[in-house]
Image (cartoon, helix red, strand yellow):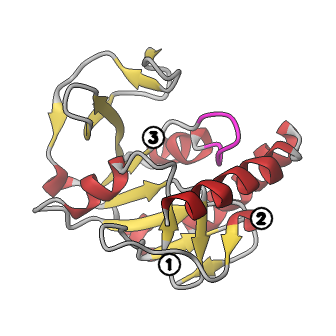
Amino acid sequence: MAEGKDVIRSNIKKKILAYSQDEINGYSRDICNNLQSINEFIEANVVMAFISIPGEVNTSYIIDECFKLGKSVVVPKVNWENNTMFAVQIACKDQQLKPNKYGIFEPENSDEYSVEDIDLIVVPGLGFDENLNRLGRGGGFYDKYLSQNGCRAFKCGVAFEIQMLTNMLVCVHDQKVDLLITEKRIIR
């Protein structure tokens, strides 16, 4: 089953590489606009958003909007010793972030923000289906984080329409999202 997922991941990455940066930014703005329209975002006080890497939805639009609206923003940070992820609050959109060993930007501080206090989590994925199943990058970080005790946050997947899959392979540990937003639609 993992081999099948690896092929799907590779195919999706190839499709995304065909997008220009202008297309990625335009679609990302559309996704941010769609996110702002849902009640779960409007009512959220604390939003967890990932710091995007090339080829992902550009979450800087989401983070900027959260700060404009006075929401608290937390971002993921990885503990490589035990391969887990935790949330760290950032104080402003211009806060200094440093690349980790995989080039993903994270805050320098390691003060863990309680998962119980997060209202909405913006969840990345390489692929999603209309049943709100998610295909991650294979590390299991989000599956572990979203399944922990005390995680009550609304889980909102964000992806480009070309990342939509049919007949997705799902494992027992795979965590679904509550809602999915693309540049074209909102799927509940």
Q: Amino acid at mark 1?
A: Leu
Q: Which of the two discs, 3 and 1, labels the residue nearer the N terminus?
A: 3
Task: Report how far apart the C-alphas of labels 1 and 2 lie in the structure.
Answer: 15 Å
* Magenta run includes residue 57: yes
Q: Which residues are magenta?
A: 53-58
Q: Is residue 52 visible?
A: yes
Q: Residue at x 50, y 21 (%)?
A: 94
Task: Give residue 133's position: percent from left, percent from top.
Answer: 48, 75
Q: Is residue 38 visible?
A: no
Of residues 74 and 169, the one drawn nearer to the viewer in this rendering = 169
Q: Residue at x 30, y 67 (%)?
A: 173
Label 2, on which residue?
162
Task: Give residue 110's position: percent from left, percent from top.
Answer: 21, 23
Task: Give residue 58's position: percent from left, percent from top.
Answer: 65, 43
- Dot 2 surroundings within 10 Å: few (below 14), some, or many (20 or more)? some
The kind of secondary structure element at disc 3 is: helix
Q: Main secondary structure of the magenta part?
A: loop
Q: Amino acid at mark 2?
A: Ile
Q: Are marks 1 and 2 in contact (CB under 8 Å)?
A: no
Label 1, on which residue?
132
Between disc 3 and disc 1, the foreground one is 1
Label 3, on which residue?
67
User: In screen coordinates, is 60 left or right of 177?
Assistant: right
